[in-house]
Image (cartoon, rainbow, N blue to C red):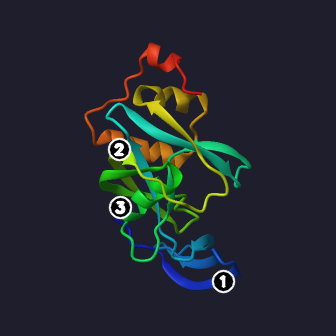
Amino acid sequence: MRSLPTILKTELLAKSDWFQIEALHLEFSNGQQRIYERLRGSGYQSVIVVAQPDPDHVLLVREYAVGVEQRVLGLPKGGVDGDETPEQAANRELMEEVGLRANRVRELGLLTLAPGHLCHSCRVVLAEDLQPCAAEGDEPEPLEVIHVPLAQLPALVASGELQEARAIAALFMALSRSDRHLVRSDEAASRSPF
């Protein structure tokens, strides 16, 4: 395996409360030099939650996403506060966004987001054995919660209704660790919860 490039210099190009834009001057093992820019976070940690009310369904949420200026379908997600574990943060986000808490939570792994440009990752947490338990969150409006059969997920992705990459990857991670398989059935694919 090749060695990592040598960082010759790092420059801070811009900074906000949430992000820093850096230029990294790199030298690769073959002597080539390049300047790469990256968006560096402020140490913010986050979770994305695959909440399954039963083995055949998952809870999706529809919320406004300012980056694309539209309402998007995805999974409950949010930041890890203070000394919280990813599992504790996932349960808190579930209570705030969906009005449920999980009796069983487990971390499934880590997703990196555009690692060629961003220094951000997100922990994927599976939440099962759900029960009602609401908490006040920081959402500006209630999220639309949609109870979706697992068999409909391929059709939602194929139609473009579910297009958030983190959600699709997190669902794949959760389903690859279960005995449930996403076999498309024409009957399930033709019904839509929307």
Labels 1, 3: front one: 3
Q: From mark 2 to mark 3, how far is it between C-alphas?
A: 15 Å
SS state under label 1? strand
In the visual, does 99 lie left or right of 172? right
C-beta proximity under 8 Å, tags 1 and 2: no
Neighbourhood count class around disc 2 (C-alpha, 10 Å): few under 14, some 14–19, many 20 upward: many
- Depth check: give the residue in front, 112 or 50: 50
Q: Where residue 12 is drawn, which disc sits there?
A: 1
Residue extending furthest toward the top = 187
- Depth check: give the residue in front, 133 or 5: 133
Q: Earlier in the sequence, mark 1 or mark 2?
A: 1
Q: Where residue 86 is drawn, which disc sits there?
A: none
Q: Earlier in the sequence, mark 1 or mark 3?
A: 1
Neighbourhood count class around disc 3 (C-alpha, 10 Å): few under 14, some 14–19, many 20 upward: many
Q: From mark 1 to mark 2, how far is it between C-alphas?
A: 38 Å
Q: Is residue 110 visible?
A: yes
Residue at 62%, 58% (x, y): give it: 139
* Residue position marked by numbered label 2 in the rendering: 174
Looking at the rendered structure, the kind of residue marked 2 is Ala
Measured as percent of width and height from the top left, residue 181 is found at 32, 30
Q: Is residue 84 above or below residue 194?
A: below
Q: Earlier in the sequence, mark 2 or mark 3?
A: 3
Q: Where residue 87 is drawn, which disc sits there?
A: 3
Measured as percent of width and height from the top left, residue 159 is found at 59, 28
Residue at 35%, 50% (x, y): give it: 126
C-beta proximity under 8 Å, tags 2 and 3: no
Neighbourhood count class around disc 1 (C-alpha, 10 Å): few under 14, some 14–19, many 20 upward: few
Measured as percent of width and height from the top left, residue 43 is found at 51, 76
C-beta proximity under 8 Å, tags 1 and 3: no
Question: Where on the picture, by quarter, is residue 125?
Answer: bottom left
Q: Is residue 171 above or below residue 158?
A: below
